[in-house]
Image (spheres, grey):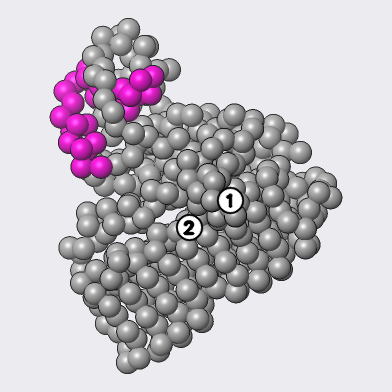
Amino acid sequence: MLVFDDHASAFYPLALNRSVGDLRCGILKLRQRLQQLFAAERTAVWIEPRLLTLYAERHPDWLINKKPDQPELWINSRLQVSPAAVSLIQGLEPEQGLRNGEILIAFRSSRCVELPSGPSELQSVGCSLQPCELPVYGNLSDLIHDNDRLLRFDFDHFFSDQDNYFETEPGVTTLNPYQIWIAEGVELKPGVVLDASEGPIVLDEGAKVMPNAVITGPAYIGKHSVVKVGAKIYGGTSIGPVCKVGGEVEGSILQAFSNKQHDGFLGHSFVGEWVNIGADTNNSDLKNTYKNVSFYSYASRGKIDSGSIFLGALLADHVKLGINASLNTGCVVGIGSNLWGADLITGFVPDFSWGQGSQLTTYRFDAFCQTAAAVKQRRQLAFSDAEKDLYRKILENWGR
């Protein structure tokens, strides 16, 4: 099976430095879920060409942007997975595919082909495409608002029947324990409440939940992540691996390696990797008018309607927010931005911005690289030349 990206710009800035398939939604990344459901024997992807060097460095064993050496089932990484979608795709015969308008959903080829530019090209080489109404994600807001559903889906399909190390210390309270899955090496401190009354909770390998923290389902705490003392983690929240999270979090996704250690509210937001959110920083996820929240789209070069009254902040990788920062509804902060001060952060903050409020300048690229390298070194990871080159191109093409 080969997972392909299309319309990646609709998922910027989170997809500026990663495949759309590597965005987290639910417990798994989009690509991982498809590979599990369709029993992929190897990892094969088709991504934006500018990501090729970085991905080849990180994943030398993957098949990346190469014509497969055997017939493949191709699936769009943006597919909103459901039992109906899985059934339709599994039923495809060679030279058959599915399309939703001009969006290519999936196709099965008996020949070794490259990714076609769209349904028309695929039909021109003899593939029969059936129309369908299978939905795909259109932007980052869609991922945030489907996170609750996919947390439940992933628990039912990938965790509920796996070995469960459900052992709790005295003083830990669990509600609806059959909907709680605890991996090996999880540490739960006294006073912790795991409330799965409204949805499942998954605590992955090596996660630590400190005293008096409350987690309500559906929720996922990733490998080696830490939930701080007295934290309140509400339903619809996915916290990826190696994060530190405190305060109040609701309906949000943290990709990985990011910290929101202190008090403050994070709601209906998407946080990338290597992000640090300062103490008492808060975001708004609901307008006083209760109208739909709009947000800046890189693809449209302007604001678009999220379709929901709930939307917080979209924070790209390596964003740093100082103490007591305030983010408005639908705020988009580009890669590598370093922001502080009492001024409301609102609208769109371009990549590599530095400063406060309306007084923004361009973050010096050498200073950004030094900070990025130092942050990654703390997790025994290197800031490679391939990463540096990619970020330089992002600054030149999308930054300030």
Q: Nearer the viewer, mark 1 or mark 2?
A: 1
**Amino acid beneath label 1:** Thr
Q: Going by the image, does 101 lie left or right of 23?
A: left
**Amino acid beneath label 2:** Ser
Mark closest to the chain's N terminus, 1 or 2: 2
Region of the chain picked out in magenta, as a range: 82-108
Identified at 32% across, 28% down, the residue is: 105
Q: Position of residue 99 (x, y in %)?
A: 31, 22
Local SS, label 2: loop
Q: Given the current orientation, which residue lies at the most extreme front position? A: 289
Q: Given the current orientation, which residue lies at the most extreme bottom position? A: 170
Q: Is residue 113 visible?
A: yes
Find disc 1 in the rendering and name its residue: 289
Occupied quadrant, residue 121: top left
395 is higher (above) or lower (below) than 258: above
Which quadrant would the N terminus be assigned to in this image?
top left
